[in-house]
Image (spheres, rainbow, N blue to C red):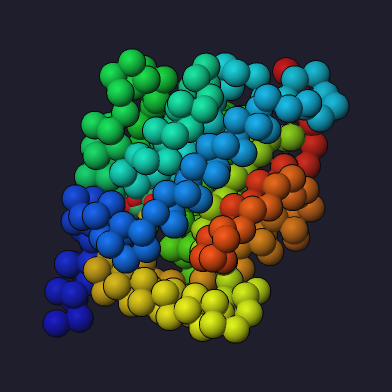
């Protein structure tokens, strides 16, 4: 029985692909959508703003990497905000990638390279050196041990001085009163639902700041949704970009 449960969970993210948007909207309204929009907004601001010292930091031809992209809503917003930028979209689920591909207008599809990879497996890209990296509601999928490996793999794909934009759930411990209680309940429900239906082993929100602070990354943006459900953070990788 345990074996068959595991077998069912293996294709879990593929099965989620068709209902993910609908169920998200039903359970959480537009909260996650707003966080994804905020990520696109920050990406636009950061790319338009002054660049840190160095010969070149985030040229428009340098790709951005979107990982655990899901059904492509975050990518669609980014393509709009960064109209010159090529993207690499990575997800472990073929069905999610398929859904994302359909969502993106044909005119923008030539700017996107799609990769089906299950992190922390290596990406089949040669020295990508991405200018930006985006993960929305993806890093929460991992246990602390898994997160260490996934984080290290992704960090190595980002060029020095590059940005990593993270949208995820706010840790309950950083909220007060009923919001803290509600956040705990929301997370417990989501972890249970994904734990039953996908290969995800994580059962609680890992510390998503720790890998960045431990590696000396600079936080350049912090946004918390009005109700406190989600947080968007922009981190800059230490070092200067080389030509
Ligand atoms: C909770 S969904 C988030 C999707 C999207 N980023 C969003 O904002 O809604 C997690 C996504 O990560 C993908 N995923 C989960 N574990 C993965 C792994 N180890 N490697 C690659 N993708 C993974 C799933 O297929 C799914 O599309």
Left or right of residue 64, residue 220 in this image: right
Q: In which quarter of the image is residue 214?
A: bottom right
Residue nearest the viewer, comparing 90 with 136: 136
> Toward the viewer: 176 or 123?
176
Which x, y percent locates residue 102?
Answer: 24, 31
Q: Residue at x 39, y 33 (%)?
A: 76
Residue drawn at point x = 54 percent, y = 77 percent = 179
Q: Can residue 3 be seen in this view?
A: yes
Location of the C terminus (image quadrant)? top right
Quadrant location, the N terminus: bottom left
* Identity of the residue drawn at 56% across and 79% down: 180
Q: In which quarter of the image is residue 26?
A: bottom left
Q: Is residue 91 visible?
A: no
Please give the count of numbered marks on the rendered protein.
0
Of residues 144 and 41, which is closer to you in this image? 41
Q: Is residue 165 left or right of residue 220?
A: left
Left or right of residue 202: residue 229? right
Image coordinates for residue 155, horizontal then vertical, percent: 62, 45
| Residue 42 percent coordinates (x, y) | 62, 38
Which residue lies at the image location 39% right of the left edge and 27% below the top edge? 113
Answer with left or right where residue 227 lies relative to residue 234.
left
Provide residue 73's location: percent of width, then percent of height. Answer: 37, 41
Q: Residue furthest front?
A: 226
Picture layout, residue 237 above or below residue 131:
below
In the rendered view, would you say 72 is above or below 44?
below
């Amino acid at each position: 029985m345990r074996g068959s449960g595991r077998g069912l969970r293996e294709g879990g993210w593929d099965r989620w692909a068709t209902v993910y948007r609908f169920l998200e909207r039903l359970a959480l309204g537009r909260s996650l959508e707003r966080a994804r929009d905020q990520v696109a907004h920050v990406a636009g601001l950061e790319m338009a703003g002054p660049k840190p010292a160095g010969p070149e930091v985030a040229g428009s031809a340098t790709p951005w990497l979107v990982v655990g992209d899901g059904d492509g809503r975050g990518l669609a917003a980014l393509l709009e905000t960064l109209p010159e930028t090529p993207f690499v979209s990575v997800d472990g689920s073929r069905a999610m990638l398929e859904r994302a591909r359909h969502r993106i207008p044909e005119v923008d599809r030539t700017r996107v390279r799609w990769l089906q990879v299950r992190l922390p497996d290596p990406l089949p890209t040669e020295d990508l050196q991405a200018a930006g990296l985006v993960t929305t509601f993806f890093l929460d999928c991992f246990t602390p041990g898994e997160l260490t490996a996934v984080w290290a793999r992704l960090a190595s794909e980002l060029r020095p001085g590059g940005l990593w934009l993270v949208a995820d759930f706010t840790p309950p411990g950083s909220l007060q009163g009923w919001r803290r209680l509600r956040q705990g309940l929301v997370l417990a429900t989501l972890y249970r639902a994904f734990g039953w239906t996908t290969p995800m082993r994580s059962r609680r929100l890992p510390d998503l700041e720790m890998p960045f602070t431990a590696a000396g990354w600079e936080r350049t943006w912090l946004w918390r949704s009005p109700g406190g459900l989600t947080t968007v953070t922009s981190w800059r990788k230490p070092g200067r970009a080389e030509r």
